[in-house]
Image (cartoon, rainbow, N blue to C red):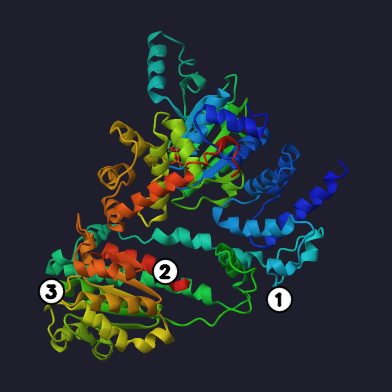
Amino acid sequence: MTNQQPLLQEITAFCRLLKQMGVNVTTTNQISFCRSVEIIDIGEQQDFYDTAKMNLIANESDRALFDTAFDWFWRYPRPDPQELGIDTDEEQVMSLENLFNAEETVVNLDQWTEMDDDKEEGEEDTIAYSAEKVLTQKDFGQFTAEEMQKAQEVIAKLVPLLATKLSRRKKTSTKGKTIDFRRSWRKNIAYGGEPLKLIRKRQKVKKNKILLLCDVSGSMDYYSTFLIQFIYGMQQALEEVEVAVFSTELTNITGLLRRKGLEEGLREVAQVVPDWSGGTRIGESIVAFNREFGRSFSAYRTVVILISDGWDRGEADILQKGMEVLHRQAYKLIWLNPLLGSEGYQPICRGIRTALPHVDYFLPAHNLDSLIQLTKVLTPIWSD
Amino acid sequence: MIESIEEVQETFVEQHYIADRALATTIYLAHHLKKPIFLEGEPGVGKTEVAKVLAGATGGNLIRLQCYEGLDVNSALYEWNYTKQILQLRIDEVQGMDKEQIGADLFSEEFLLKRPLLEAIQADGAAPPVLLIDEVDRSDSEFEAFLLEILSDFQITIPEIGTIRAKHIPYVVLTSNRTREIHEALKRRCLYQWIDYPSVEKEFAIVKTKLPHIDDMLAQQLCNLMRVFREGDYYKKPGVAETLDWGLALIALGKDGLDPAIVDETLGCIFKYQDDIQRARETGLDKMVDGARSDSEANDAEKADWRYMRG
Ligand SMILES: Nc1ncnc2c1ncn2[C@@H]1O[C@H](COP(=O)(O)OP(=O)(O)O)[C@@H](O)[C@H]1O
Ligand SMILES: [Mg+2]
């Protein structure tokens, strides 16, 4: 019994450590853990670990945090606090000595829990657009003029919502070092990274940029137009967007859209772009694209979104080389293919087969739903 | 059966359930501390089955409350049997009962329709029942508050009858597929256990215990390929249920190994959505099947005794 006492003290200190790291351990949890420890054989390390975990965390997403605390705390001799990543200069520092004091020292717990990652994830699907469901699932290519109008309205309504999500992510991830303490901590652990010296030495993050490369040959101009509208709608959240279109030749239309505005600009594009809705030379266009936007790639963290059905009339090895270079330079390369939305589609055409190995994401883009899906892919990339 | 963690594992194996040590520890502690268990994980990883197996192992009754959107307290707890009450009124009248007496007993236990929670609290069998509150994430969050209350004191007050206290504290297993976050307060009442997709070795053990006639090599290849599929980017990743369905189909087809053609034909057992099937094809079945086959040779040697494996 007497040598139980120190163990109880240790348990209390361990729970306090977890709390300071932002895990909401309750008194009941703590008591339950103590009772469990009387029942299991604490000589069995694995059982002790499992028991602590099932009593003290109630979310798989807290696991990594728990593991770090556990590995550090239940080791003898206890390693240097530095290994826990505690920056003792911080204002919001947790003082390890306090762990063993009777008084609670929960530092700014509210502030930390306020930005709990998990809560944000839960909101993911709360956008209500059920009334427009039919519309969001219909292929752009089959829209009547009236539906086209309606779709624009849906986009206008939806896009700001999606954009807020994007920018909110972005904001929390670039927040000042003191407030971001817990989040970066969690994050680092999740990636099995260095023991947590990250708080001060955060790398200067490059600005994000989206480059749209749109195929406007044949029926592709429909889909490309929707994509451009969609992405432009989110421009505020996306910081930097540039657009180039191609069928046989590449044209950068960023300036045109800026000068004329989106609506007017898109109407005029058809006149300035040579061979609009003609044949396709994807490879040559990509090579031109790499040249045109070469500087962007080093100055920005660039996400390239390429929309095309992959029907290429150009040379296969040009496409192959172009994709290789593009993939190397871009931070992420997303290929949108409206055909992916059609039943039974298989990427057999040569263009796609050549390009696929160089693509990070291969996604549909034939209706609003798939564009919404695209933002879900973009969100984590954005806040990386 | 719950005298040690090993015993839990062994009893579960007898019931054809492969429990890793962490889960067995949870059950062992739930028994001794009389705490509910909260199991969270993707669909098809074996959460619901835990409650069924626990009932089988302890000899207690399985009482199931399946949650759904709009589930309210009445359907979970009790309702009055109006039809029976009205009938009783008629009978009383016909029998010429005293005016004063008519309807006096209408709100007694006889007219109570017990729903799962009341049933669990009133159970008086030899062993405590196992109360399965399945897929809590499908209920509305107000319902969670109510659950929290019930799970705190295992008693119910029915105004017309009085307070009913549980004779045995039931085993309680809550599950969530995590389609939404359950409030921490509820989860922190429980012993929390996240159930992941099984490792290849664990899944092999599951397949062998559920489909004892399956060829070893086929089982191994199947599990290897399942892991590859789960690493892929699918809308709905296949769970253990799909593995077992698929295994059954392959046995029916008389297969003792995988080849791309048969996998292609039976993709419908693995994926529910056409998009996922298509994606699997696009990813290249040949290569995946090849990998699964060569892995199976490598892994053939290490078929550990899963009962004693550590999570
Ligand atoms: N560890 C396991 N041992 C034996 N069978 C399992 C195991 N895990 C899953 N299964 C089987 O997989 C199927 C799906 O399990 P289920 O409990 O319904 O999943 P969940 O409730 O997590 O969605 C069931 O047939 C179950 O028997
Ligand atoms: Mg289930």
User: What is the chain letter for disc 1?
Assistant: A
Q: Nearer the viewer, residue A345 or B146?
A: A345
**Dot label at residue B196:** none
Q: Name the residue under label 2.
A: A379
Q: Name the residue under label 1.
A: A91
Q: Is residue B74 above or below residue A56?
A: above
What is the x, y in percent for residue B278?
A: 26, 54
> Label 3 sits on what residue type?
Gly
User: Marks 3 and 2, Cα distance to the nearest angstrom?
Assistant: 31 Å
Q: Is residue A7 left or right of residue A362?
A: right
Q: Residue furthest right?
A: A2
What is the x, y in percent for residue A170?
A: 47, 74
Q: Is mark 1 on a helix, strand or loop?
A: loop
Q: Mark 3 points at which residue?
A: A218
What is the x, y in percent for residue B195?
A: 52, 45
Q: Is mark 2 on a helix, strand or loop?
A: helix
